[in-house]
Structures are given as structure tokens and as C-alpha cells.
Image (tube, helix red, strand yellow):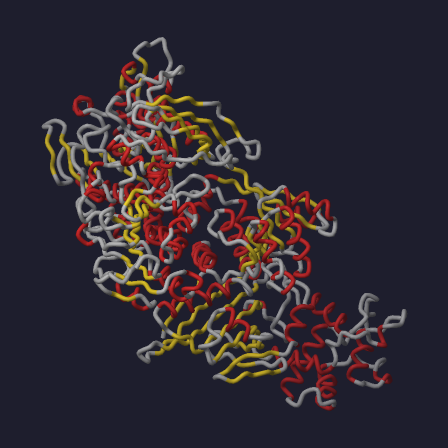
Amino acid sequence: MLGNGVVGILSESVNKWERRAPLTPSHCARLLHSGRDKTGVARIIVQPSTKRIHHDAMYEDVGCEISEDLSQCGLILGIKQPKLEMILPDRAYAFFSHTHKAQKENMPLLDKSWSILAERVSLYDYELIVGDHGKRLLAFGKYAGRAGFIDFLHGLGQRYLSLGYSTPFLSLGASYMYTSLAAAKAAVISVGEEIATLGLPSGICPLVFVFTGSGNVSSGAQEIFKLLPHAFVDPSRLPELSGTAKDAAQPTRSSKRVFHVYGCVVTSKDMVQHKDSTRAFDKADYYAHPEHYNPVFHERIVPYASVIVNCMYWEKRFPRLLSTEQFQDLMRKGCKLIGISDITCDIRGSIEFVNQATSIDSPFFRYDPVNDSYHHDMDGAGVICQAVDILPTEFAKEASQHFGDILSQFVGNLASTRDITKIPAHLTRACITHGGVLTSLYEYITRMRKSGSEEILKSPSKHQSNKKYNISVSLSGHLFDQFLINEALDIIEAAGGSFHLVKCDVGQCSNSMSFSELEVGADDRAVLDQIIDSLTSLANPNENYDLKQEKNKISLRIGKVQESPMKENGTKRKVGVLIIGAGRVCQPAAEMLASISEMSSQKWCKACLEDDFEEKNDVQVTVASLYLKDAEEITEGIPNTRAVQLDVTDTGSLHKYISEAELVISLLPAFCHITVANACIELKRHLVTASYVDDSMSKLDEKAKSAGITILGEMGLDPGIDHMMAMKMINQAHVRKGKVRSFTSYCGGLPSPAAANNPLAYKFSWSPAGAIRAGRNPATYKSRGEIVQVDAVKQRIPNLPAFALECLPNRNSLVYGELYGIGHEASTVFRGTLRYEGFGEIMGTLSRIGLFESDPHPLLKDEKRPTFRKFLSELLKIGSEDLDGPLIGEKVITERIIKLGYCKDQGTALRAAKTITFLGLHDQKEIPASCRSAFDVSCLLMEDRLAYSSTEQDMVLLHHEVEVEFPDGLREKHSGTLLEFGQTKNGKMITAMAFTVGIPAAIGALLILGNKVKTRGVLRPIEPEVYVPAMDIIQAYGIKVMEKIE
């Protein structure tokens, strides 16, 4: 069965709350629908489960089989280990086995007669799938911190209510009660907004949350905390903060409200002090000799804390954070501590009185220090305590999606191979057992248990770290037979650092020492300091280490911290983005990128981007334009921006500014993109454009891949948001096994109804040449199975009754059937451009008159310039004797249009005549020498007469309709509508068109910079890794899409 391409998904049975899945239905759909030749997966069989976050029917809808029997599967996936008696022989299994550290409690998985080894199972452990950067690829790190902190806030509201205080926290639910992490964050944000608006009772303030540790758990908890209006205080300022609060809480001011909360992050130097008062704290000395230090956390921190959020690693040889006796003494003195959130679930550990684990459905107990008693309620004296050990599953949907996004990249390799040497190295390294034996990399498990003598590792090649801070760490001792090497690596990874094994010499017998040299890196100095602290605690440091140390000790040597010169000083990394082109679209893009780290931006960032991108990075935007003044107008008043002059035909200058950035956004005319793209490939910089990906750009795909860059095109409105809306709707239909029978799409940039105040009911916010040409192009589309080829025509739009609109079919709609993957199933595929009703007839009449002819006109060749009236008279064949008479009016023009056969309908002819006079074609002014054709004349007048005033709003309307047929015969019509109006900001009108083009371009840049888009080459936003997060951010940023199903 091994390598047969059939994948099984286990039903989880370890814990009732375990609702995560290794692959979601969308992952399964991608694996199955892409074909075995591409993915290596032929079938997926899912064990039925009524508690899994994704229902069985959802898996079945995408082509999975539902069955308890996984005997046909060559690869079986789970989260936790299956029951031993259910393990099938000669299969590959992947789950968190917790065996690679030789944990005693998990050894039955290897020991029993029906064990992994006995059944000749190939066991892949997710914890061991490590990328080239040395970090685990599959982990749930921050989810525990996020869920744990939200759960505590939920309980905090109940606790305060029992004490007589109503707080905004009371409205917050537990993490698992929300449909998504984004929804949970939105709820916390709402709580924060209520605090900022209505405040907290002064009787519970200052409300101080103390966070211990700075690893992934603490980072996740702080991520949620930062959604509240907050301020961080240094531990040394806690007494001062408390004193100020006491002064403010006098009886005469008891009604005072406080509008934010406080956070305080503590480290080891805040927890202990040297017994010799003349000696300062030294962390290396502390970790080497903790017996030389006295605990002070209970004196310096706890008296001023409202909540302790415990996220730190602790060992018994160190002083406790808070002993039972210390706490009892503090409470007798009136300590205000209200709760402990022990996210580490360290039972009887650093906080002694946390003596029991709690569950998701009963997450709190109350400890009464006066009576030294425990209670399972929120009423009465004491503190509430939380210690849940399976927190990540509360965000089962996001955790599963995050997990499956990565796992799905490996499943094909694992499912289709029998020979583990033929799969990628990072998967081979994750295989603990194969063919009934431990693989060579994990023979140390046997050595640790049986004092074996096989060599474990080979020395890897040299490696250049890409981290900001790096340090050389040398470890010696019984690293492998006592598994200390893995503990060291776990410490590095858990803190968010990376490592590279520079050198490794493994002892050949149980009495021999092993030596490993690691290069340890982190982008944050505090993270690196934490790693050093933890590694020092693992070791018993001795500068001149003795090779006869006890087996459970290691010797540690730490080099000097090296800071990469490629990164700026400070806690945030400076990320450069170059925007080329300073037109209207530029300002919204520049503002969004430059303000990424501001509080106003962080709320939507935190709900959609994750990974603290906005906290770890400052985006520095350079706006480049041929005319410096244009760039300066864009950057005025926007922080973190600068303006430069750039001519893209000047290769030297172009390369200079591109090389200073990590990503380029080109907002130039489409024909200029290829020049910028070639420079980006040469300099290995990512590129985003809002223009169509033409043939010349598509041909750069392989070059872009070789350069390791992403060129993301069509990231605007149309093209851009139209693609993303379409793919979201189509994929939702396909997941439900529906077939798209009809796809129609309409999009238009229009004046708002109030600004549609001319006969054409249209205005231009840029040169009209492109719009005029587009309206004259022939069009091809599919309607009810027939291919329709037409010249530029208009169609009435009946489905948007609020506006009198018509549609001009776009050039070739058929290519979108193929692009969207519906060409074989949809009988109707149509895309068109929206205009107010009558536009097409008027423009058609003007075209027949000859006003859009681009060939040089004989009348415009002479140096003596004709008047507009003379030129119009020439086109309408009006005699020269009439030129010196009264002004040619609408009546005369209408009659000539009818007589010459340019239009048969009197009403249309009159509207065309009104347009001609509105444009000024009947004026006695000379035509400028720059105009050589009728097209030039029309563009000149339209640009002048059909421009927006400074206070007029434009409007963008995008509407999709998708008709879906399901296997049971049910038909549904899905529609999505985006309607956006221009807005005045700081006295300046930001057009809806500029906003809806510029924001997607900026989002594309953020997704690439945040490593959400990992694919390299030339892309459109039709891939899930682009459109799923992009649409989330677009809507969170305020561009709303209204969806309806009929």
C-alpha cells in the first residue's frame, strides 16, 4: 500500500475538544482536482467525524470518500497519534508522535507488539519538518497565546461582575465561540473601542497585565492584548503607576473612568536579585548558579499586577515566580491581583498554587489563599486561575487552514513514494521509523535508552544566515544519547529564532562526548537574548568546560552577537517600497503602505495579515515621478515617504532606486512595465502592477522564477478585484460540486449621479484616449452556448434598477472562461464595461460623424489653424457660407446628423448634438497645432470639458452574476456587488477609481512582503494564496462587497 497515492485522514479520538484536521476540504479539493500527475494524490478517504471543524459532507462535496476503513490508504494523516490497536501495517503515518525526544510516556508507540516499529510503519513527525531557515514549518505556536488570552478576558468579565463591576469584557465570549480568529479579534477590538469610549471603573484601575516570557506563546497573547487601548510600562515604573492611580481614586473622584489598560513584560532580571547586594544581575551567572539569587517577583511585580499571564519556560532549579506562601502573605496585605492565566499550563510549577489543569469547557478555578482552598466558581475571595493544555484547537478552523496550507505541499511526496531517499530532504529528516527500524537520524532514541553507539548526524555545508542578529553557540556533552541537542533546538525554535548546524562531531560510544556548533539567529535582539537565557539554563556553564561532566549536563560557549549590516538599527525592520508613477492612484497606495504600523491601520492588519508584520516592519515608501513636483504633492503629509525624480528610460537611475527597495509598484502606463520588470528581475526585486499581464510580461515568467521574485500583475480594480471576486464565487461553487453555467461581469468607473451633469453623463479623471479606443473595439463573448462576435454595441442592464445603466461588451470574454477554469462548463461568459444609459448611442453617433478618426485630417495639416466650428462644419458638410452667420446650434447639428444618416433616431441625434455643443466643437476658437486628427481634437475637448471639478465625486460599480447548477438539479444565482464613491480627505478628493485601484496594488505588495504569497514568477490574482487574504483585507479596509444568493 505504501506509495499508492491514496491518503487517509483520521478522526481524532484523544480529546473531545480536538476538532482540528490536518487537511481542510479546500486543501483536499486542490489535491484531487489538480490530478495525480501533478499532486501525487489519487484518492482521499476521510474517517467520519461529527466533531471535526469541517463536516464530512464538505469533504464529500470536493470528491473525498467517507469511510471508517482506511485499509486502502498508503498514507494516513492525523493531528494526534491514533489508538495503537488501529495502526495498520506497511503504511506511512504522519502526526505529532512526541517520540523524537524519547519521551517515556510515548514510548509504547514504539515498544508494543502492535507498535509503529512492529507494523513496519513509516512515521513522519510534524515537529521534525524543518525548513532551510531552521524553523519548524508545521506548528501551532501563537494560537495557544491568542486563545488563552481571549479566554481569560472572557472570564475576567465574569469575575469583575461577581465583584460588583460591570466591564466591557463581559460581552466577550471564549475563543471557541467565534467562527474565526478574525471574528474573535473583531470582538476584542469592539471591547477595546468600548473601553476607549466609555472607560473602565476607576475601582479596578490601573488594570495591569503582566506578561512573563517573550516566545511565541507570549507573542500571541500580547497580539490580542494590543487590540485594546493600551500602554506598556517598564517594570520599574509599576509602583509609580499604582501611586498615581491611588491619588486619582479618592472618594471625591470615585466616578472617574479610565480609558486604557496597561501591559508589562518581565524578564529574569525583574524576577530575582543577587544575594550579594553589591553585585548587579548577570543573566549568565543566574542561569549557571540560580542558588546565588533570591526571588523578588513577589515584591517588585505582583503587588502592582492585576493579571499575570504566564508564558515562560521554568525549571525546578530556579526560584518560583510566586509561591503559595508568598501569595498568601501578599493577599493579607491587600494585593489587588485578580487572576492568573497560566498559558504554559505548568502545574505546580513557577506559580505554585496553580495545582491543576483546566479544560476548555471549564477553564477556571478559584484559589482562596486565606483558607488555602480551591473552588470551581467565580464568586468569593481569592484569584481565578486558568491552565488549559489544548488551547490551539479553539481556533480549529484557522489552525487547520494554517497547518494544511503547509502540509498540502508535502502530501504528494509522502503519498506517492516507497523510497524515503527519493523525497525532499526536509521530509526525509522528519521520518523517524521506516521498514521496522528507526531511521539513522533518530537512532539516538535507542542510544538514549539503550546506550547504543551508532553515528547520528553528518556535518552540513556552510550556511549564510539571513537574520539581523546572529551568534555562534558551541555545545558539548552527551548531546544525543541524552537528547540535549534537541532540547537546545526546541528552545531556539520556540522563541522564534532560527538555527543552522555548522559543525557536529558525535560520540561513538556511551562514554564519549559530542560536540555541536550552531549559528543561532533572530531578527529581534530581545528574542536572541531570551534564547541565550534559555540555553544557559539548559547548560551548567563553565568557561573552561570539563569533559568529565555528568551526563545530564552540557557545556556552553557563546560567541559575540553579530548584527547584520543589511538591516536598520531598532526593533523594527525597514522595508523599502518604490512606487513609480505619481498619478491619482498613487496616493491611496502610498498612504496604506506608509501607515502600516500606525494604530489606525493595525486593527485590520491584525485581523487579516497575522504574524505581526505591521509590528516587526516599518514600510518606507519612495514615490518616483518624471516630475518631482508631482511626487512631492503625493507624499505631502504622509509619514515614512519621500519623493524623487525618476526617468525610467535612465537605466542608471532606475536601477539605483529599485536596488534600494524590496518591492516595486509600477503605476506607469502599461507599455512601461516591461522596462521596470526587466530591471526588477536583474536586481531580484518583487514587482506589482495594476495593468493587464500581456504577452511580453508573460514571457518573463521563467526569468522571474529564476530570480526568485514575484511579478504580480492585474492587481487593481478591473483587472484585479474583478478577478478575485470571480474566483471566490466560482471556487465556492466548485467546492459544493456545482457547475458554473453562466458568468457575467460588469464594471465601470462613472460620475456619481450628482456629477453626471453633461449630455454624455460621463467624465474622465485621466486622458480619454484609452476609454474612447476601448469603446470602439469589437467584442467576443459566449451566450447560451453560442459564440457572439459584435462590433462595439450597448446592452441594457436590467439587474441594477437603482441606476439606468448600459454595458459595452469587453474585447474577448472567452479568455476569462479559460482563465477562471469554467470554459468547459459555462454556456454564457460575458464581461462588459458599464456606462449610463445612452452613452453607447451617443458615442456611436460621434464615431460615425468621424470625430474619433485617428488618421491625420487634411484641414489640420496647414500651419493656418482652423476653428473648431470650421472643423465641425467640414465633418457635417455644412456650407462655408454659413460659417460667418449665427453660431451653429443644436437644431442645425441635429438635422445634419439625421440627413447624413449618422443616426436615425431623433432623440439620439439631439443628445449627440447637445454633446457636440457642450464640448465646444461649434466654437470660433482656433484648434491648437498639437491636434493633427479628429481623434486629437475630440480628446482635447473631452479632457477639458468632461473633467471632474475638485468637489465632484466619481463612482465605481462592479457587479458579478454567477449561475450555478448542482448535481441534484438545484440552480442558484450568486451575485456580488461593489459600489464605491469618491471621498474628500484632508480637503482633497480621493476618487473611487484611484482608491479601488491603488489599495489592491498596495495589498499585493503587503502580501508579498509578508510572505503570504510564496509563488514566484508572473502571477495574476486568481490563485487562492492571493485572492483569499486580499479580499479579506480589501473588505476590512472598507471596500465592501455585497453578496447575495437566490
Query: Is residue 460 something that shows in the picture?
Result: yes
Depicted 641 relative to depicted 667: above or below? above
State the quadrant of the N terminus.
bottom left
Please state the horizontal and vertical placement of residue 492, each as a whole percent of the image: 38, 33
- State the residue in front, 261 or 285: 285
Depicted 421 relative to depicted 967: above or below? above
Left or right: residue 322 versus residue 1015 is left
Residue at coordinates 44% horizontally, 28% vertically from top-left? Answer: 517
- State the residue in front, 273 or 600: 273
Please state the horizontal and vertical placement of residue 171, each as a whole percent of the image: 26, 48
Left or right: residue 899 versus residue 79 is right
Query: Is residue 240 something that shows in the picture?
Result: no
Please state the horizontal and vertical placement of residue 272, each as a whole percent of the image: 30, 19
Depicted 586 relative to depicted 223: above or below? below
State the quadrant of the C terminus.
bottom left
Depicted 262 relative to depicted 50: above or below? above
Residue 337 falls in which quadrant of the image?
top left
State the residue lying farthest toward the right: 863
Q: How many marks?
A: 0
Please state the horizontal and vertical placement of residue 509, each as a whole percent of the image: 32, 27
- State the residue in front, 92 or 970: 92
Residue 230 falls in which quadrant of the image?
top left
